[in-house]
Image: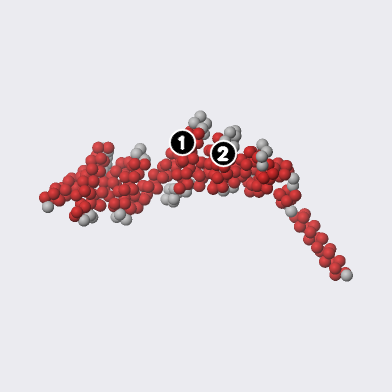
Amino acid sequence: MEMKRIHTFLFLVLVFLGSSCKTEFEKLRMEGSVEERLAKANEYLANEECYKAQVLFESIIGNYRGRPEQEKIYFDYAKSHYCQGNYIYSSSYFKNFSSTYPNSDLREEADYMVGYSYYKMSPTFRLDQSYTTKAIDEFQLFINTHPNSERVADCNRLIDECRKKMESKIFDEGRLYYDLKQYQSATFSFENLLKDFPESPNAEEVRYLIAQASYKWAENSILEKQEERYLATVKSTKDFLRKHGESRYKSEISKIKADSEAKLKEIKNE
């Protein structure tokens, strides 16, 4: 009997300790009213305690279905994911917010945050640029949807930044092909770069590398393919000299042009 009393006493002590050790957040999450949880979620978000805010918003959002308060709660729920760095979730929730509340006063900010969430996921230029492309698309959509917004200038700046990153990736790939002596792939990469980024500040170097890669591709081709490839090389050298007549590469490109024209004469004579 005495043993039973001891066990009961120890059990009550553990229960008491367990309940007293609960944090304010845990008590609120498990026992707080909907209104208390909403007030505290807003407080947590304001203090950048984002995970706690997210958990509390998540626990009450269903209770406000069909009520006017749900609009702000849903927006802040998306925001709580963003401030934790959960950008894939924040982009999705902000996108859903705009679809659900197209006339909301918060719509403009939500549309911007979709693009900015993708921008935050955009990696270094050496990696896959899918998120960079999505950021550009969303920023452009924002500009089209909100042409008078104060955020338009910022969107244009971020689009330029993203495009530079994508340009760097294509240039890096072309350069890698060139260094690996894959001259056909290098030529195509550099030509695509100029199509996508005609105003590139690296246009002179890109056209120089196109001429070099094209010449080396022709040199290493079978006889049947040499004529068309030397013709392409001559075309690329003429393009370079027309656009960069005072370049430091002028003499080198002129030599490639002359050598290619000489090779074409030999081929015709043969």
Q: Quadrant of residue 191?
A: top left
Disc 2 target residue: 98
The percent coordinates of residue 233 (x first, y second) are: 23, 46
The percent coordinates of residue 182 (x first, y second) are: 30, 54
Scheme by which the image is coloured: secondary structure
Q: Which residue lies at the image location 29% right of the left edge and 55% below the top edge?
A: 181
Horizontal side of 24 relative to 233 (left or right) equals: right
Q: Dots 1 and 2: beta carbons under 8 Å?
A: no
Residue 215 seen from this side: yes
User: Which residue type does callout 1 highlight?
Assistant: Asn
The outermost residue toward the left is 269
The outermost residue toward the right is 1
The outermost residue toward the front is 66
User: Which residue type does callout 2 highlight?
Assistant: Ser
Q: Between disc 1 and disc 2, whose residue precedes?
A: 2
Disc on res. 156: 1
Q: Quadrant of residue 167?
A: top left
